[in-house]
Amino acid sequence: MVFFGGVFPKRPCIMRSIKNKRAGRQVRFKVSGIWAVLFAAGVMFSPQQAIAQQMQALARLDVGRSGVTGRASGDVDIVLKITQAVPFRVFTLDKPARLVMDFREVNFNGVEKQDLVKTDLIEDMRTGLFRPGWSRMVLKLKRPMQVFRTAMETDPNDGDAKIVIRLTPQDPDDFAAGVGAQPDDVWAMPKAASSGGGKSRTSGDRKIVVALDPGHGGIDPGAQYQGFNEADLMLQLARELKEKLILTGRYNVFLTREEDYFLSLEGRVSVARANWADVFISLHADALAEGRATGTTIYTLSDKASDRAAETLAANHDRDDLLAGVNLSHQDDVVASILMEMMQVETMPRSEKLADALVTGIAEAVGKIRSRPRLSAGFSVLKAPDIPSILIEFGFMSNPADLTNLATQSWRDKAIIGVVDALDQWSLRDAAESKLLRQ
């Protein structure tokens, strides 16, 4: 179930309904015209107030007047005071149970769980960019709960707004049946881009199109260690690698995300396919709670993770995302599996050869690499059946030496040289094989 609220730009009239299960009544609300305001509580603005709000900067959270508290009944009350009214939506997700709140746009910089959450019914809180122009707050619930009430109240004098949400306990089966955002609502993420068909394999007659995928971002910072975020480190490395590849004159390169915002695994592969990528390279630097893993590791796709560490990493990267790749939603499971397997017959061996080249290239460049540098795992981000895809763990942030390397420009420069050399060697051999296949 999804709840909506906020100020909308001019658009055709939209009708939405919300059914309050506890009260057993139906609430209907309407959006129409540039000054329309959508609130579950039915609060209205004047045109002058709307203009003033549109001219302000993004909304900011007043932490002192906000909070997440529990009731003796087991309910949870969420109060968010922000500096102006914004469109927002609220929905739930399962496994684990979470409440998701999207806003356009609220600045949550510096806001920590301990600043807002005053109940043990909320196990964790995350905030950050969901995508450009949109913020997200995620509350991990101790048990399944439904959104019983949501409302936005606006001060007619200064335009400040208060979002009020009530959560009530819910049966786990009922909760699981009602999770997820509506696929056709006005806040939905853009649909996965289609490449419009297959792309011919290069035979050396054009530049190689490389998709660099900096892992995590925005609401999902990835591994965090000693003040460093995996998302930030990988975005920096991706920008530097992109520059080096372009300067060779042999590659066209784009990043799946250019800034610090969230992009689903499905969205990352969709971006690669929409830009006709010849190769997809996902960049990561994880941290393990147990063990002493160290050094660079190159992953290719496997139906089953090759060892326990790979299984752990795969579980982390696949969290909250659908399988990525080609849209087979209109095919049954048998047909979809056959089509994907047929496409991967050619793609997966090419991925394996690229991974081998990267192991050699990076080892020669940095002088040291993990003792078992070639592994396989079920990463969703590697499941595009039509693009050779690999994932590079440049190190483990939980290892002091690896973290120092990742934060050091000279080490990153060496690692980048290794990647460029590997791509050069692989692309030449791949083009030669392509010519043989065409003869």
Image (cartoon, rainbow, N blue to C red):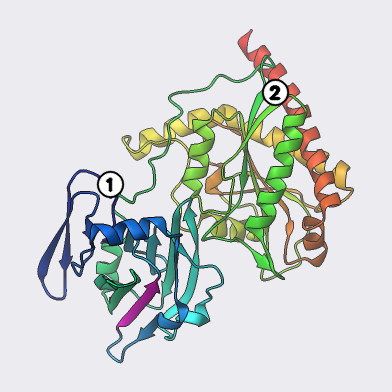
- Find the residue positioned furthest to the front: 48
Q: Position of residue 4 (x, y in %)?
A: 27, 60
- Find the residue positioned furthest to the left: 25
Q: Amino acid at mark 1?
A: Asp
Residue that numbered label 1 is attached to: 184
Pointer 1 local density, CA inside 10 Å: few below 14, some 14–19, many at least 20:
few
Image check: 424 left or right of 437?
right
Residue plotted at (52% across, 73% down): 111
Residue plotted at (81% across, 33% down): 421
Q: Amino acid at mark 2?
A: Asp
Whether residue 289 is visible: yes
Q: Is residue 284 above or below residue 240?
A: below
Start-end of magenta stretch: 75-82
Q: Is residue 298 above or below residue 398?
A: above
Residue plotted at (51% across, 77% down): 113
Pointer 2 local density, CA inside 10 Å: few below 14, some 14–19, many at least 20:
some
Q: Position of residue 235 (x, y in %)?
A: 65, 50
Q: Earlier in the sequence, mark 2 or mark 1?
A: 1
Image check: 85 left or right of 264?
left
- How many angstroms separate mark 2 from mark 1 (CA)? 42 Å
Residue 404 part of the magenta-drawn span = no
Residue that numbered label 2 is attached to: 430
Whether residue 6 is visible: no
- Find the residue positioned furthest to the right: 367
- Disc 2 on helix, strand or loop? helix
Residue plotted at (41% across, 82% down): 65
Q: Which mark is residue 385?
A: none
Q: Is residue 377 above or below residue 313?
A: above
